[in-house]
Image (tube, coloured by chain):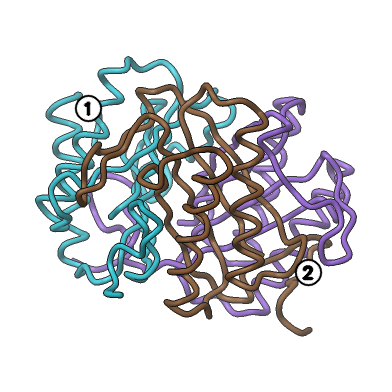
Chain colours: A purple, B cyan, C brown
Amino acid sequence: MPFARIDLIKGKSPEYRRTIGQIVYTAMVEVLKAPENDRFQVITEHEEGNFIYDPSFFGIERSVDLIFVQMALAEGRTVEQKRAFYKQVADELHAQLDLRREDIFINLIGTGREDWSFGNGEASLVKS
Amino acid sequence: MPFARIDLIKGKSPEYRRTIGQIVYTAMVEVLKAPENDRFQVITEHEEGNFIYDPSFFGIERSVDLIFVQMALAEGRTVEQKRAFYKQVADELHAQLDLRREDIFINLIGTGREDWSFGNGEASLVKS
Amino acid sequence: MPFARIDLIKGKSPEYRRTIGQIVYTAMVEVLKAPENDRFQVITEHEEGNFIYDPSFFGIERSVDLIFVQMALAEGRTVEQKRAFYKQVADELHAQLDLRREDIFINLIGTGREDWSFGNGEASLVKS
């Protein structure tokens, strides 16, 4: 059920953007134990002036390649799972796209299980 | 106070998009008991490659007409209200726009009452 | 760690948009006690038809200059801090950009401290 918003500056190829989505999805399934095929994401490309980040906050040097990943998901994952999720996303983006690990900013938003309808006008995760 | 983000693939008419917003708003008022005129929404249209969804997750067949509705609202609604909200949104989108019920994905995000300012720099829902 | 999404109708200058971001950031640091340089924001400009608001809900008269500010941040701020944040954002937008206080809609979304990675694939706010 996670729903991810991925934001970045314009200029990357469709294949590059698609791969970001694929990596976030794979880490969701492998680490956060989301079900297979539970993939819902929007990617938004911004003009440079509308994509604002600090280049060195928290001692991390960021570049124009920075991506924001904001993902809503039902609560219940442990801190260790979240930690492993961040690591896998960063490791894979680095391995597959040569994206610097410094350039990956992630924010999770917790929800209840009753907060999701995957279709058909039903509350998909609660029994009726 | 709900604030809704509606995302879909480019190509629908302004009237079609406006009607989606109207239907989400009406269900908010009728089912979730939001006050009349409490309507704040942004609609974002995406290139197909930036709008990613699984075509059959959870046994639901989705098409390029899929819409994502993500809505922040103060906590306090019951599971039954949320369930009825999903149903009314899907039923009305189907009735008014011939949108397939399978093509409606909804995610709610709960907030506190102190998390809203409707204007004037005030915390609108908490007493001063 | 706050991550802000700022939405408005197209037509404002880059400088105007940049100043909105600056004011939201400054209030975050001064009032919500976010650390210096903790600035991560995306600004999205919309066609008028995709930016939907009620012109008088809650007795507040809104115009096409309305902006939505939606900000995710770790829980722990008091109601008084949030109230002061809304006020400073509205006061400064009015003072610096002549934006009407009525035209500022703000929504906060609370998260856990484990819900943030500022980079390097690490859970930035929890000890390992």
The subunit carrying tag 1 is B
Q: Is residue A118 above or below residue A18?
A: below
Question: Residue at the location (48% across, 40% down)?
Answer: B54
Q: Which mark is residue A38?
A: none
Amino acid type indicated by mark 2: Glu
| Pair 1/2: label in front | 1
Evaluate whether residue A25 shows in this view. Answer: no
Distance between the alpha carbons at the discs numbered 1 and 2: 43 Å
Task: State whether residue B3 appears in this view.
Answer: yes
Residue B121, x across and y down, in percent: 41, 57
Return the chain for callout 2.
C
Q: Residue furthest front?
A: C95
Residue B19 got which mark? 1
Q: Which quadrant would residue C34 be assigned to in this image?
A: bottom right
Mark 1, Cα crowd under 10 Å, few <14 / some 14-19 / many 20+, is some
Q: Residue at x 72, y 38 (%)?
A: A19
Which residue appears farthest toward the left when viewing the image?
B30
Q: Is residue C32 left or right of residue A123?
A: right
Q: Could you say which is closer to the camera, residue A105 or residue A75?
A: A105
Residue drawn at x 59%, y 53% is C24
Number of numbered discs overlaid on the protein picture: 2
Instruction: Tell which of C114 and B40 is nearer to you.
Output: B40
Q: Which of A122/B2 is in front?
A: B2
Residue A80 image point, x, y percent: 68, 79
Give the percent coordinates (x, y) of residue B125: 28, 66
In the rendered image, which residue does mark 2 sit on? Answer: C122
The image position of residue C118, as x and y in percent, is 75, 62
Mark 2, other Cα within 10 Å: few <14 / some 14–19 / many ≥20: many
Q: SS of the residue at dot 1?
A: helix
Q: Quadrant of the C terminus of chain B?
A: bottom left
SS of the residue under disc 2: loop
